[in-house]
Image: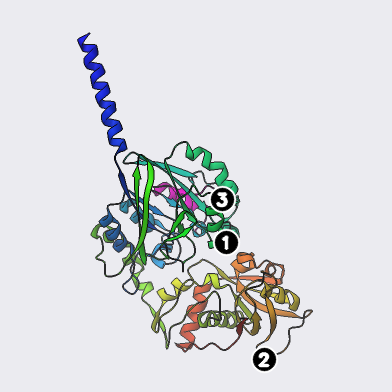
């Protein structure tokens, strides 16, 4: 009997202690990144994953999350198909990440290999794929709080990823996909976090549909930095290429959120974490010679743009037209990934501008097809002058178009055009180009075309020449 009483007392005390612990206020720290794009090394003294690691470790986070596009953008990452990026993120100790549209750039077999190597899942609740390693969500318990982390990927993946890598892949409607997965996660979690690789409009849709999701760790739109609010939902994001690390602080009382705040920490003048630098170094040594080859010089910064004429876009289109020996050249601005600064130009600079494995294509388009293509969205061009109204719907944006010398474009006439295989396949929605005639894929990588152009011209002196006009 005494033993029974003692046992009962122990159980009561244990339960009382457990309830007391659970009832204590809990503070949670989340570190987050997005759109790293393989930027393992600092650029002009900013970023670098060894430096990012130093800041993250200094926070002593309970969760470390990424919102997608960890791949594509630097030679050191792309030459090894993302392997060093995964190794570094493993060592940092990421909890989970999200499938961004660029995770598929190396092809599905490579992505499956990287997912198997990762010590953390890459999540997406709305992507239907033949890749079983992609999970919809992950539940993690920290300090007695159960966190349901759901990944979500932009519906734009259908047009921003090369079609050759999308076999068997479908992006479901974001809201419908979340409606399906949320009931399951609600039963397992006290607090839901969405790691979301979305456009600004998609973020608004999701926040409006699911106000119970109080925190979105965001990505995809590079020029947007967090935090900001959409209703009662906080959106936190860090720009791109590791220029900032994000921190979110959460306070809970009896598993209910009582306070939330977020901030950005610049990755500048930060000492690198030695163990992370040691992982990167062998990869860096292997690519150093190629990256550092001098090929030319720029007398001013060569800047890209998604909403105006771009001197860098002009030069790239000129390089395509010169190589393809055609009347016209077209380049989608989304394929131009960064700028080239004034001064010496290296092979590595050009790689980072045109990092994708896209090739040069020549074909013929009628004047009518050409106008329809120019009506869809902004393009960098050579051999043309055109005006576009970006406020109008895609497909209705062309104001006028002529050849460079002012000659009107004849709807029935055939024109020779150089572009890339991404645009040819309907990338970024340019579906009309694939209907052209006499299509020839040269197999030459775009960056090699631009490297040859720079070597031939040696000094690039950028100046916009009015070939593209944006209607105000």
The N terminus - image quarter? top left
Badge 3 local density, few (<14 within 10 Å), some, or many (20+)? Answer: some
Q: Is residue 91 visible?
A: yes
Badge 2 local density, few (<14 within 10 Å), some, or many (20+)? Answer: few
| Residue 258 lies in the magenta stretch | no
- The residue that label 2 is drawn on is 405
Above or below 446: residue 277? above
Pointer 1 with pointer 2, Cβ within 8 A? no
Above or below 78: residue 256? above
Q: Choose between 177 and 299: the one closer to the eye.
A: 177
Gap between marks 3 and 2 measured at Cα: 51 Å
Quarter occupied by residue 164: bottom right
Sequence-wise, the earlier of marks 1 and 2 is: 1
Work out which residue is located at the far top of the displayed protein and give it: 1
Sequence-wise, the earlier of marks 3 and 2 is: 3
Q: Choose between 324 and 423: the one closer to the eye.
A: 423
Q: Which residues are magenta?
A: 106-125
Quarter occupied by residue 141: top left
- The residue that label 3 is drawn on is 209
| Residue 119 lies in the magenta stretch | yes
State the image coordinates of residue 115 (x, y, percent, origin top left). Answer: 44, 49
Sequence-wise, the earlier of marks 3 and 1 is: 1
State the image coordinates of residue 110 (x, y, percent, origin top left). Answer: 47, 53
Q: Is residue 161 visible?
A: no
- The residue that label 1 is drawn on is 162
Badge 1 local density, few (<14 within 10 Å), some, or many (20+)? Answer: many
Work out which residue is located at the far bottom of the displayed protein and give it: 405
Pointer 3 with pointer 1, Cβ within 8 A? no
Q: Secondary structure at mark 3?
A: helix
Gap between marks 3 and 1 measured at Cα: 30 Å
The C terminus - image quarter? bottom right
State the image coordinates of residue 20 (x, y, percent, origin top left). Answer: 28, 34
């Amino acid at each position: 009997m005494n033993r029974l009483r003692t046992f009962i007392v122990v159980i009561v005390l244990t339960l009382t202690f457990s309830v007391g612990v659970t009832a204590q206020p809990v503070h949670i720290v989340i570190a987050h990144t997005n759109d790293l794009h393989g930027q393992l090394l600092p650029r002009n003294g900013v970023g670098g994953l060894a430096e990012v690691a130093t800041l993250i470790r200094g926070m002593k986070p309970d969760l470390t999350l990424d919102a997608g596009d960890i791949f594509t953008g630097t030679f050191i990452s792309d030459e090894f198909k993302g392997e060093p990026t995964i190794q570094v993120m493993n060592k940092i100790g990421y909890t989970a990440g999200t499938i961004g549209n660029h995770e598929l750039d190396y092809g599905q077999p490579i992505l499956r290999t990287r997912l198997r190597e990762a010590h953390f899942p890459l999540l997406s609740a709305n992507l239907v794929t033949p890749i079983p390693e992609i999970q919809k969500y992950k539940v993690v318990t920290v300090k007695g709080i159960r966190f349901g982390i759901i990944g979500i990927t932009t519906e734009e993946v259908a047009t921003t990823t090369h079609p050759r890598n999308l076999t068997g892949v479908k992006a479901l409607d974001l809201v419908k996909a979340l409606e399906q997965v949320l009931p399951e996660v609600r039963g397992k979690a006290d607090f839901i976090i969405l790691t979301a690789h979305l456009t600004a409009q998609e973020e608004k849709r999701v926040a409006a549909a699911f106000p119970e999701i109080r925190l979105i760790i965001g990505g995809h739109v590079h020029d947007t930095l967090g935090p900001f609010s959409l209703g009662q939902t906080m959106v936190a994001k860090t720009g791109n290429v590791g220029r900032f690390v994000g921190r979110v602080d959460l306070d809970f009382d009896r598993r209910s959120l009582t306070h939330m705040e977020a901030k950005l920490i610049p990755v500048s003048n930060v000492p690198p974490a030695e163990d992370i630098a040691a992982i990167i170094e062998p990869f860096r040594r292997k690519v150093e010679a190629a990256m550092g080859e001098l090929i030319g010089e720029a007398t001013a910064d060569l800047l890209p743009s998604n909403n105006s004429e771009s001197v860098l876009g002009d030069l790239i289109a000129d390089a395509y037209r010169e190589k393809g020996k055609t009347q016209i050249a077209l380049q989608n601005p989304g394929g131009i990934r960064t700028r080239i600064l004034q001064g010496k130009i290296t092979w590595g600079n050009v790689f980072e501008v045109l990092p994708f494995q896209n090739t040069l294509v020549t074909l013929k388009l009628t004047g009518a097809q050409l106008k329809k293509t120019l009506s869809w969205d902004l393009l960098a061009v050579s051999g043309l002058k055109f005006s576009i109204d970006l406020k109008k719907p895609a497909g209705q944006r062309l104001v006028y178009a002529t050849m460079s010398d002012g000659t009107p474009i004849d709807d029935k006439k055939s024109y020779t055009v150089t572009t890339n295989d991404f645009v040819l396949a309907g990338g970024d929605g340019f579906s009309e180009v694939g209907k052209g005639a006499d299509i020839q894929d040269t197999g030459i990588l775009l960056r090699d075309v631009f490297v040859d152009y720079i070597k031939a011209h040696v000094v690039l002196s950028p100046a916009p020449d009015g070939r593209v006009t944006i209607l105000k």
